Amino acid sequence: MRKKLGLTRMEIITLIVTVLMILLPTLFVAYAWGSFDGIIYRFTNRNVVDTERALEEEARIMRLMKKSDYGNWWFFDFRISRDGERRIVTGWSAQSALDPRSPWHDPFYTDIVFVHTEAEALDFPDNIIVAWPREYSFMEQDINNISRRVNERPLVTFEEFGLTDPVTVADLVDNWEKVSELMVALRILEW
């Protein structure tokens, strides 16, 4: 046997002891938990479920941050409510309330919703941050710049983003994801 494996008797004994040292605690845990299936479930399934949940939560947070950045870009007003008290804040304040990495994070707030007017914002519960286009801003000029840039670049068309020329203020609210994708394509705003 020594010639086939190329190991000395001491090396074989050391190998067996090492394997047993690794295997025995695992067997003990299996016995304590009741079965090998329990070990497999506890070490694999739970981690997979936790990882999926964490990835879903991270995707939700990234979407909220993207919405907040978009609202900031267009100078939307943001309404934050708590205990019936309503405040109009900047998008950065709204983003800080939603981002769990922020020291100002508040798990009470769960989403950002875009609406057309401040009056529409009153219909939402306090845990939803609501944003709408300001009446007085450079929004119309910026929207016209989008149309101009699309017309200057024949590789980018409104149709490929599901939009029509010209983009309107209503599109900024109703089709925010499409407008955001168009802006990225035009390199107006990099996410």
Image: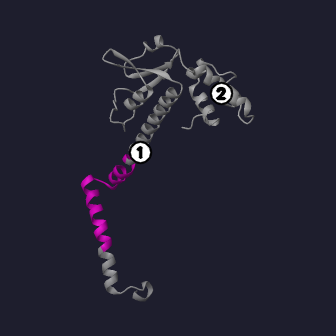
Q: Nearer the viewer, mark 2 or mark 1?
A: 2
Quadrant the N terminus occupies = bottom left
Residue that carries the numbered disc 1 in the rendered image: 51
Quadrant the C terminus occupies = top right
Residue visible at 31% across and 80% down in the picture: 13
- Above or below residue 174? Residue 183 is below
Examine the structure image and report whether residue 148 is included in the region drawn in magenta: no
Res 162 visible: no
- Above or below residue 173? Residue 123 is above
Res 57 visible: yes
The part of the chain drawn in magenta is: 18-46
Check disc 2 and report its element: helix, strand or loop.
Answer: helix
Place residue 106 in its image quadrant: top left
Q: Position of residue 95 (x, y in %)?
A: 42, 30
Q: Position of residue 101 (x, y in %)?
A: 37, 39
Examine the structure image and report whether residue 34 is included in the region drawn in magenta: yes
Pick the front one: 171 or 46? 171
Q: Residues within 10 Å of mark 1 (few under 14, many from 20)?
A: few
Q: Position of residue 186 (x, y in %)?
A: 65, 35
Pick the front one: 83 or 58? 83
Q: Are marks 2 and 1 in contact (CB under 8 Å)?
A: no
Residue that carries the numbered disc 2 in the rendered image: 146
Mark closest to the chain's N terminus, 2 or 1: 1
Residue lying farthest to the bottom in this orientation:
3
Magenta segment main secondary structure: helix
Check disc 1 and report its element: helix, strand or loop.
Answer: helix
Amino acid marked by disc 1: Thr
Left or right position of 174 against 123: right
Real-space Cα distance between discs 2 and 1?
40 Å
